[in-house]
Image (tube, grey):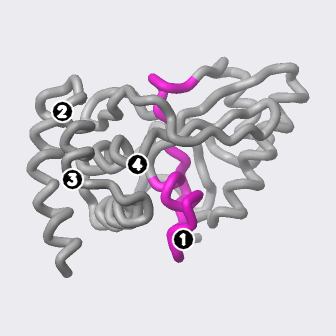
Amino acid sequence: MAGLSKSEWKQKLCAISESLDGQGRHAQLMVIGSWPAIEDGMPGRTSLDLDVWVEGSDFIEPVLVRACADAGLLFNPTQPEEELDGQTPYLQLVEPGIVQVPDRPPRSKVNLGALKILVPPPAALIASKLTRAAPKDLDDCLYLQHRHGVREAAIRDAIDAFSDAFAKQTAIENLVLLRVRAAQ
């Protein structure tokens, strides 16, 4: 399986919301990674994982674990990606480290009932993806940059808000890769 599409992820998120509601609970997830590009309609973009930025989220872990299971998702698998079956979608918790997401008000909020999804602004998402800058990350960055008219100065401002010096330096260096990819 290559990954879930926008409509397939929406079904999973609605199933999480239904489970949360059935448990009498609510959750708010700040979603980063590929899902914001998928949600924005990036052609052909799919993903098996939903990256949740812990710092911007509010949930009770055992409740969310159950909701993910009810939705057919693994919750925060700890084994390396190559050891996963490559078929089962999963929710991945992401904490500050190599990945950084500057503290900015969310660009969008999706209310699915018991589940609210927040998405950082495009410049913050692009900056966070530049800490890794894998080919799919750069594709996502270019898509978000063009779709939302994000200027490099806004990306640099977001990178400057990183608390980790190594992540900040890596993202600044990877801006070159983004420029090269944009010129192709």
Residue 86 in sight in this render: no
User: Residue 160's spot in the image, x, y percent?
Assistant: 18, 32
Question: Would you say residue 138 sits in the magenta stretch?
Answer: no
Q: Residues within 10 Å of mark 3 (few under 14, many from 20)?
A: some
Per the image, the residue denoted by label 1 is: 2
Report how far apart the C-alphas of labels 1 and 3 lie in the structure: 31 Å
Per the image, the residue denoted by label 2 is: 160
Mark 4 secondary-structure assignment: helix
User: Residue 35's spot in the image, x, y percent?
Assistant: 53, 53
Per the image, the residue denoted by label 3 is: 152
Say which quadrant the C terminus sits in.
bottom left
The residue shown at (26%, 45%) is 154
Query: Mark 1 or 3, which is nearer the eye?
Result: 3
The residue shown at (61%, 54%) is 89
Question: Would you say residue 37 sits in the magenta stretch?
Answer: yes
- Sequence order check, earlier mark of 1 and 3: 1
